[in-house]
Image (cartoon, rainbow, N blue to C red):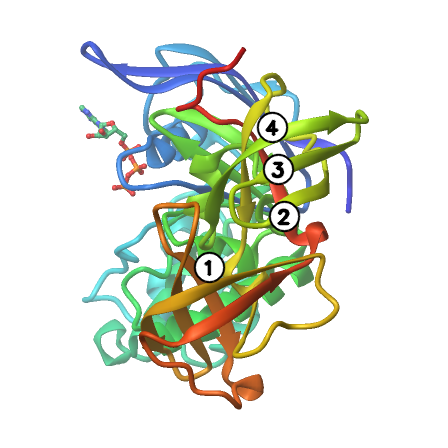
């Protein structure tokens, strides 16, 4: 991975009237990385992308691309290209003319345009389809034409606004891998906006999570999942059981906490959470819990409970287990492969967990600290 910053965003803000869509956002994007801005609808991620592209002016702050301040530079003069959610390919033009569109009227020789179009179509595995009508393409092929049309301009940065959202689930998953491979082989920086956590996790080197106009955490997918900086991030990316906990012993990087159902647990302090307070939340991912009809061996903590609900997802089975000491049932997810015991609602079961799977989520916002 190159460490040079291709985009530097400094104190970026966008207000629409009195509404603050993006507040004081600073972020560096590295050359050659696949970066995703992830967040719920309306959190401001598209607005950030549009400010990078030059389709929208910031209220305050700065965007630098390759060291150059983009203030006052029109979208078509920036070293970026954007792929839109709706593809925006022209139905009346054939594939070749769609891809060539941005190159025309720039004094580029016809033979060079043809060569570049052909090269861009090869990149997206549509080689030789120049004369095919735009309306004669499948959804996935149309999306690839949209990609080729952006890539033919040889941008330093490709901006992608929910590029796969118009595709059905199967095709979307296939395109996720294809786009990731394409990005890696070209080495161009991709910046993608998505509200789909799985899409962001499967495709990206790093993800920036946004809520309410604010960038709350930037990390690699694995780190976001293992060490979320807030409860909000923890529940947006994957599923998480939250338990109240109290710190009983503090060794700096390691703390011992007491939880209502699992008792005392020595755990790692999470470097991503805001420190402070004796009463914290801890999180356990559903797939980190063992569920068993008898008390399971080899776990740091176990608790007995009653099955409330069972949901069969094919590849895995989700259980909700009510245990004493906490209000909400605990979610446990078991791969179907190991699923030799079929637990049913009302069954008494045991849950087992390793303390290494218990995540410090920082001060409990609802708790009185003393
Ligand atoms: P989505 O995934 O739904 O596109 P988003 O996170 O990309 O959401 P933005 O499109 O960036 O969100 O919009 C952020 C907020 O700013 C929203 O509340 C939106 O209504 C508001 N907004 C966006 N564009 C404008 C505009 N031109 N005028 C007024 N408000 C706007």
User: Depth check: 80 or 23 in front?
Assistant: 23
Mark 2, secondary structure of its residue: strand
Left or right of 91? Residue 342 is: right
Mark 3, secondary structure of its residue: strand
User: Depth check: 168 or 268 in front?
Assistant: 268
Q: Nearer the viewer, mark 1 or mark 3?
A: 3
Q: Position of residue 147 (x, y in %)?
A: 44, 60
Q: Residue 66: which disc?
A: none
Q: Position of residue 130 (x, y in %)?
A: 40, 75
Instruction: Tell me the residue that label 1 is attached to.
Output: 198
Dot 3 or dot 4, earlier in sequence: 3
Instruction: Tell me the residue that label 3 is attached to.
Output: 258
Dot 1 or dot 3, earlier in sequence: 1
Mark 4, secondary structure of its residue: loop
Residue at the (28%, 60%) spot, across then down = 89
Q: CA distance from mark 4 to mark 1?
A: 23 Å
Dot 3 or dot 2, earlier in sequence: 3
Q: Nearer the viewer, mark 3 or mark 4?
A: 3
Q: CA distance from mark 3 to mark 4?
A: 19 Å
Instruction: Tell me the residue that label 2 is attached to.
Output: 358
Visible in this render: residue 292? yes
Instruction: Tell me the residue that label 4 is attached to.
Output: 273
Determine whether label 3 and label 2 are within 8 Å by CB. Answer: no
Q: Nearer the viewer, mark 1 or mark 2?
A: 2
């Amino acid at each position: 991975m190159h460490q040079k910053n291709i985009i530097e965003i400094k104190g970026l803000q966008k207000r629409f009237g009195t509404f603050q869509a993006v507040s004081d956002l600073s972020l560096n994007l590295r050359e050659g990385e696949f970066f995703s801005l992830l967040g719920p609808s309306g959190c401001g991620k598209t607005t950030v992308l549009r400010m990078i592209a030059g389709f929208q002016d910031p209220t305050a702050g700065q965007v630098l691309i390759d060291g150059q301040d983009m203030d006052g530079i029109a979208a078509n003069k920036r070293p970026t290209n954007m792929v839109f959610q709706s593809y925006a390919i022209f139905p009346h033009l054939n594939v070749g003319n769609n891809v060539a569109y941005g190159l025309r009227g720039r004094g580029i020789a016809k033979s060079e345009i043809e060569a570049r179009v052909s090269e861009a179509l090869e990149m997206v595995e549509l080689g030789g389809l120049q004369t095919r009508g735009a309306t004669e393409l499948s959804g996935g092929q149309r999306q690839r034409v949209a990609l080729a049309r952006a890539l033919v301009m040889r941008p330093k940065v490709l901006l992608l606004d929910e590029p796969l959202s118009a595709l059905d689930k199967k095709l979307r998953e296939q395109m996720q891998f294809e786009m990731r491979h394409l990005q890696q082989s070209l080495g161009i920086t991709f910046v993608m906006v998505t509200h789909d956590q799985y899409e962001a996790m499967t495709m990206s080197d790093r993800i920036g999570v946004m809520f309410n106009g604010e960038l709350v955490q930037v990390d690699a997918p694995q780190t976001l999942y293992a060490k979320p900086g807030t409860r909000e991030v923890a529940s947006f990316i994957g599923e998480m059981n939250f338990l109240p906990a109290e710190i009983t012993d503090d060794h700096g990087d390691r703390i011992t906490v007491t939880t209502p159902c699992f008792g005392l647990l020595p755990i790692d302090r999470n470097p991503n959470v805001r420190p402070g307070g004796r009463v914290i939340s801890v999180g356990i991912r559903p797939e980190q819990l063992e569920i068993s009809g008898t008390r399971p061996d080899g776990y740091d903590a176990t608790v007995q409970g009653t099955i409330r609900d069972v949901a069969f997802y094919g590849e895995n089975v989700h259980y909700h287990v009510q245990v004493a000491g906490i209000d909400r049932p605990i979610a446990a997810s078991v791969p179907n492969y190991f699923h030799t015991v079929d637990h049913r609602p009302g069954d008494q079961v045991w849950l087992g967990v390793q303390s290494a799977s218990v995540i410090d989520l920082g001060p409990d916002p609802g708790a009185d600290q003393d």
